[in-house]
Amino acid sequence: MTGRVFAGRYEVGERIGVGGMAEVYTATDTTLGRVVAVKVMLPQYADDADFARRFRQEAAAAANLQSPYIVNVYDWGHDEDTYYIVMEYIRGSDLKTAIQQRGAINQRKVAEIGSQVCQALTAAHSQDIIHRDVKPQNIMVQPDGNVKVMDFGIARAKNSTADKTTVVLGTAHYASPEQAQGKDLSPASDIYSLGVVLYEASTGKLPFDGPDAVSVALMQVQDEPVPPREINPDISPELETIIMCAMQKDPSKRFATASDMRQALGAFISGRGLGATVPLETDGFTSAQTQVMPAVATLGSDATKTMPIVPGGQHAAGPKQQGVRSYNGGAEKEGMSGKKKAGIVIGVIAALAIILGLVFAFGMPGGEKAEVPDVTGMTADQAQMTIEQAGFKVGEVNNVYDDATEPGTVVGQNPKGGSQADKGSKINIDVSQGSEEIEVPDVSGMTLDEARKAITVAGFSVGETTKEYSDSVEEGHVMKQTPAAGSMAAQGSKVDLVVSQGTDQVEVPDVSGMSLDAARSRLEKAGLKISQAGTENSSSVPADSVISQSPAAGNKVPKDTTVSVVVSLGKKDTTVSVPSVVGNSQQYAESALRDAGLSVNVVSNYSQSTPAGQVMQQSISGGTRVEQGTTVTIEVSKGPAPSTTDPGEGSGSQQGTQGA
């Protein structure tokens, strides 16, 4: 595929990715002179009408979406035996790679990624387009930290019925319960998938995993995930609440829109508290039971694939993953009916609600309430003083990483500022340590593109890139980096690179017009050599001077390169000697003059002394040198002139004499 040209303008380069139905290559748009990415359908699917439809659908869906967080689609087409899509080339790596290499990601960064994906989904949902395959493999993280959502290959309009079949399309690990069951989808389905992505990014683990796509899909429908904070205690309760809300089994209990989810993430990032940004019904998950699945072939669960529909039912017998919570089956094993169990749960919840209502209405017995001061943004010392002056005590001081604040600044507190709490109670504060410091990767010897990818994957961004000559590092490869490999630096900070230009090079001086000796001296002074490639006549360059040179002046070449020159022979002599043709026949004279490179003009006159057809004289004397092409006029004899006496008159006279 490399080297192939699509539509006469997209020249395919190296392969940078491969998926279930297509490969992705870099390419050069020769018309606009820019680097693009070309997604090419795999040959085995080119004749499949369904795959071709999905491929065209992806191009049409993405091309109509305008968002800084969606990969731009520029063009698409069919070329001989395959389909292709031309899209924006994104530098960086997908989120899945980052999770696999680094494990759990800083929770603030997770929230920022989630917020940007929400904006991309808002743009899609506003066009009634549901992505249906939101997963970290389809979220590209750029060097500046911003993300781009890609791969709308199975997206469809919200009310479309094209894919309502006995199978579903998607990726089992990230599919919503309704998607796994083949039900009608809504924007809430994408919100569920995004919740799974944020769960994985913040914990480093998938909420549900199994040996095949079917078992994972069953878990999505019937099992409850382990709360994120049980896996990663550093996750804040607020972020966990957002993730759990997005992953509600019942679509109506999730965020109503992707925009609502973005507002909640924004509130968490800014430390304002979630307030009313999260739906009220977020305590616990709904528990959907599922029928036993028919026997099917094992499917890979990481790729976008067709999956059998997981039907809903009253008696689930699906497998449970060890360590994953499920609210199905426990009561039934003891003979408790579903209705009875539900009644008990509802009763407990109602009782708790009444107790909590009384507590909030009347306060705890014997405690004087006071408003908690807001100490976010203060230094730790200022916060302690403010808390104590308000009649409270400083509780736990948690050191946390925060990219947006200076070290020593309070970025969070519990209880929140403005809330009511018992005087004398403790207020826990989170104090920023600044950006998290992580180890700088070693990119020496890599190509610039390889280094950029490694730096981005490690959690940094590429800073200034400069070039220097090197006798030991191949041209185009990294020879130096700052900070040094193995050192610790703030996550997200820049790594400056120095890239080799190869061996030291010099600029070729202009020696045209110089004498050969002067040219030799000038080139040797510049660290170059000279050789004479040949000679030519020149009407403008004096003899023994340089007419032309190779390499041309201004080019950069390694030292000791030989410069070839062409030397002038001076102006070429274009004159010829006029041959003497007087006394020769006209035919000989014309031939001789033309052979000499001259033009001939012939005039004829009578001559009493020169035989007819013989040259009597020429306009330019023989032996004279003239320019080639000069015209020489020759005068050719016509023989003696005819008599001037009229023969008729003589006869008449004689006749007349005889008659007389």
Image (cartoon, grey):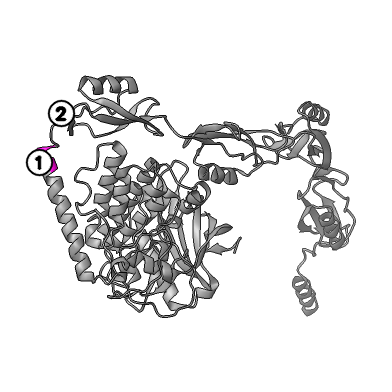
Camera-nearest residue between 83 and 537: 83
Q: Is residue 349 magenta?
A: no
Percent position of residue 358, x then y: 11, 44
User: Residue at coordinates 57% horizontally, 46% vertically from top-left?
Assistant: 449
The residue that label 1 is drawn on is 361
Number of other residues with Cα within 10 Å of mark 1, as a class: few under 14, some 14 to 19, many 20 or more: few
Q: Gap in Å between the C-alphas at discs 2 and 1?
A: 15 Å
Q: Which quarter of the rendered picture does the N terminus lie within?
A: bottom right
Q: Callout 2: few (<14), some (14-19), or many (20+) C-alpha neighbours within 10 Å?
A: some
To which quarter of the image does residue 136 belong?
bottom left
User: Which secondary structure type mostly characterizes the magenta part of the structure?
Assistant: helix
Residue at 20% x, 68% y is: 340
Mark 2 and mark 1 lie on one chain; the one further toward the N terminus is 1
Relative image position of residue 521 (x, y in whole percent):
81, 26
- The residue singled out by tag 2 in the image is 370
Q: Where is residue 200 shown, x and y percent of the image?
A: 42, 53
Residue with the most extreme front position: 334
Which is more toward the observer, 659 or 174? 174
Amino acid type, label 2: Ala
Residue lying at the far left of the rendered structure:
362
- Please state if 190 lies on the left or on the right of 94 as rendered: left
Instruction: Classify residue 383 as left or right of residue 499.
Output: left
Check the image and report above or below for 374 versus 268: above
Quarter of the rendering containing residue 607: bottom right
Of residue 135 and residue 366, the one placed in the foreground of this image is: 366
For the C terminus, the image quarter is bottom right
Q: Is residue 570 left or right of residue 97?
A: right
Image x and y of residue 8, in percent: 53, 62
Q: Which residues are magenta?
A: 359-363
